[in-house]
Amino acid sequence: MPLAFPYSAIVGQTEMKLALTLTAIDPSIGGVLVFGDRGTGKSTAVRSLAALLPPIEIAAGSAYNLPPEDGETAESVPTPVIDLPLGATEDRVVGALDLEKALTKGEKAFEPGLLARAHRGFLYIDEVNLLEDHIVDLLLDVAASGENVVEREGLSVRHAARFVLVGSGNPEEGELRPQLLDRFGLSVEVASPTDIAERVEVIRRRDAFDRDPEAFTMTWAAEDGAHREAILAARKRLAEVTLSDETLGEAARLCVALGADGLRGELTLMRASRALAAFEGATRVTRAHLRAIASSSLRHRLRRDPLDEAGSGARVERVVAEVLPA
């Protein structure tokens, strides 16, 4: 398996890296939507983070990445990162009848799809805004239930399908359906760096990695290891982080001031700020944590304002400054 680019070696893109890190700490945050220019390291960041995380333990030979039960042989596999291509058929996504076994042995057997392979890992969709509607509907059902249910061709199969959904795309190429947009916990915007020194550093590191992946990876092994340990420590600490009613009230006031639809804004703010507090080693969520994660949690939940030409991120920051002053 080819080496992944070291996560710690990714230059800039601080908001995207933080969002991915927080979902690795608490997958219930709901995934990450990354919109912006091509060639800004979106897919690289996802694969780098997955490679940085420790392997998952599954029942030997499990096609569904299920953890071993008592008495079952276990094996360790890398945290999965599964690509969902735009042209994928419904059968490939959810699974279908294993035609080879049906034709050669006359057996009705289920061949797991991409959702089964992504369980306990990441499902990555590039150009997510161009995804076909019927695939979007499938993802919405699975995201809501955490299960994939297939009933067709005389088969009835139900299996767990819980993963961190990461979608990327360019907003100029089409809008994302509101139902799917709302399912993403965090949304970040990325852009190509304009600072010459930063651009040069990106190219220099990429060239060094391409020339000698092993040597470059070893150079960043200590920093990646420290980041991994911080994530694992935050996972253990997460349940102990407290969030007061006062802080919840501040989150609610912010969402009301922004006109965010529904209550997913508050829920995401709560989960993401708690994960951030755990990552920083804090025992309670503060206003500073809410402020730090507000744009990522809320920019994709705003109603359009034709009289406000500011971007959604700028609108959030403006209201945050008014409602939650530092």
Image: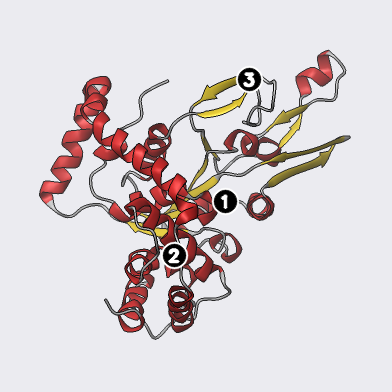
| Any part of residue 64 in sight | yes
Judge by depth and name the residue closer to the eye, 292 or 191: 292
Identify which residue is drawn at 57% across, 66% down: 178
What colouring style does the render use?
secondary structure
Residue 33 at what x, y percent from top left? 46, 55
* Residue 217 falls in image quadrant: top left
Secondary structure, mark 2, is: helix
In this figure, which residue is indicated by the disc labeled 3?
60
To which residue does mark 1 refer?
131
Residue at screen point 39% across, 39% down: 49
Circle 3 sits in a helix, a strand or a loop, which is it? Answer: loop
Position of residue 121 relative to residue 187, above or below, is: above
Q: Is residue 114 above or below residue 210?
A: below
Question: The disc labelled 3 sits on which kind of residue?
Answer: Ala
Quadrant into which the N terminus falls: top left
From the viewer's side, name the closer residue of 31 and 102.
31
Q: For this view, does 145 lie left or right of residue 36?
A: right
Q: Nearer the viewer, mark 1 or mark 3?
A: 3
Distance, label 2 to label 1, CA atoms, is: 23 Å
Disc 1 packing (10 Å; few <14; some 14–19; many ≥20): some
For the point 27% across and 20% down, the residue is: 214
Picture disc at residue 297: 2
Residue 93: x %, y % from top left: 65, 39
Inspect the image, locate mark 1, and give the three-letter code of the amino acid beneath it: Leu
Identify the amino acid type marked 2.
Ser
Nearer the camera: disc 2 or disc 1: 2
Q: Residue furthest top?
A: 104
User: Callout 2 environment at 10 Å: few (<14), some (14 to 19), or many (20+)?
Assistant: many
Of pointers 1 and 3, the one earlier in the residue sequence = 3
Please give left or right for residue 315 compared with residue 140 in the image.
left
Quarter assignment of residue 296: bottom left
